[in-house]
Image (cartoon, rainbow, N blue to C red):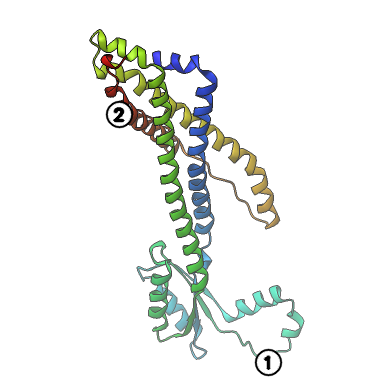
Amino acid sequence: MYSLGEMWRTPLASLMTIAVLGLSLTLPATLYLVVKNVQQVSSGFEEASEISLFVKESMSEQETQTLVKRLALYPEIESVAFISKQEALTEFKDISGFGQALEYLDSNPLPNVVLVTPTKRHRQPNAAKTLLTKLEGEREVDFGKLDIAWLERLNALLSLLKESVITITLLLLTSVTLIIGNTIRLSIMDKKEEIQVMKLVGATNTFIHAPFLWTGIWYGVIGGLFAFICIALMMWWLSSAVSGVAGVYQTSFSLIGLTLQEFGFLVLLATSLGFVGSYLSVNRYIKEIEPDKV
């Protein structure tokens, strides 16, 4: 409580330090949420890894159904759907707008198609390519199609975001540690005479360290709470804009914020940084303050 009292006696300086710490923690946490929400969007893009198998014209529908049942047993495949040539033609008429023109065709030019959705493990570009090659080896299959370029772009974007988050997080967490360490250093210098008197009466370094260590911990705890409040306000502010964009594309999407476990980790991380920063300062500067140097 003594350390909290010290912070209360210098409210402006303490508030500025807490604000800097909170904002420094807000940026990496925000980037983490960006990656988290992008992954939520990408997880719904199962069609990006969907393989289209075009069945040979000579194959009957019964033979194609046998192919569907056989593919459903593959451990790499999550689901299999069959689209007959008649269903494909009907869908093409509805989408293309050439319905009347297509009525003049003597025969249906579209093939039977089998849509294969790989399991989550096999949706990565390399695994999807391997699965496509394997499926094209089936005797009923003429050829297969997979939008590999889209998959590679999507995964490259997610990898870039993750690497950026890690890099920026490390830099900002280091800056948080240095900020707390410098704040505690200034506090030690301000109380230099008090520390000298305490050492004169026999106080140990451990006893003298404690208030400064607790001050750093409190800076971390309050800074973590400040960061959480900033993130919550930002998510609330952006939620309406995101809903508006989703409405334009006739879909629904809501931003995902921090879970209770993630909030706890944020505060724990901030507290740990506060302790480390204050420990480095007290361990470095308090031992240099001796009574004979008055």
Q: Nearer the viewer, mark 2 or mark 1?
A: 2
- Residue that numbered label 2 is attached to: 284
In the rendered structure, the answer to whether residue 95 lies left or right of residue 29 reads: right
Residue 137 horizontal/vertical position (percent) = 39, 84
Q: Is residue 25 visible?
A: yes
Which badge, 2 or 1, comes first in the chain's sequence?
1
- Locate the C terminus and report the quarter of the image it occupies: top left
In the rendered structure, the answer to whether residue 46 lies left or right of residue 184 reads: right
In this view, the residue in front, 225 or 89, is: 225
Q: Is residue 103 above or below residue 2?
A: below
Classify mark 1: helix, strand or loop. Answer: loop
Near mark 1 (Cα within 10 A), the count class, few <14, some 14-19 or many ≥20, is: few
Residue 105 horizontal/vertical position (percent) = 70, 89
Q: Tell me the residue at 53%/49% (across/down).
A: 34
- Residue that numbered label 1 is attached to: 106
Give how far apart the Cα atoms at labels 2 and 1 are: 89 Å
Residue that sits furthest to the right in the current view = 100
Q: Is residue 235 above or below residue 64?
A: above
The answer to whether mark 2 and mark 1 are in CB contact below 8 A is no
Residue that sits furthest to the front in the current view = 293
In the rendered structure, the answer to whether residue 187 lies left or right of residue 93 reads: left
Q: Amino acid at mark 2?
A: Arg
In the rendered structure, the answer to whether residue 246 lies left or right of residue 215 reads: right
Residue 66 horizontal/vertical position (percent) = 42, 79
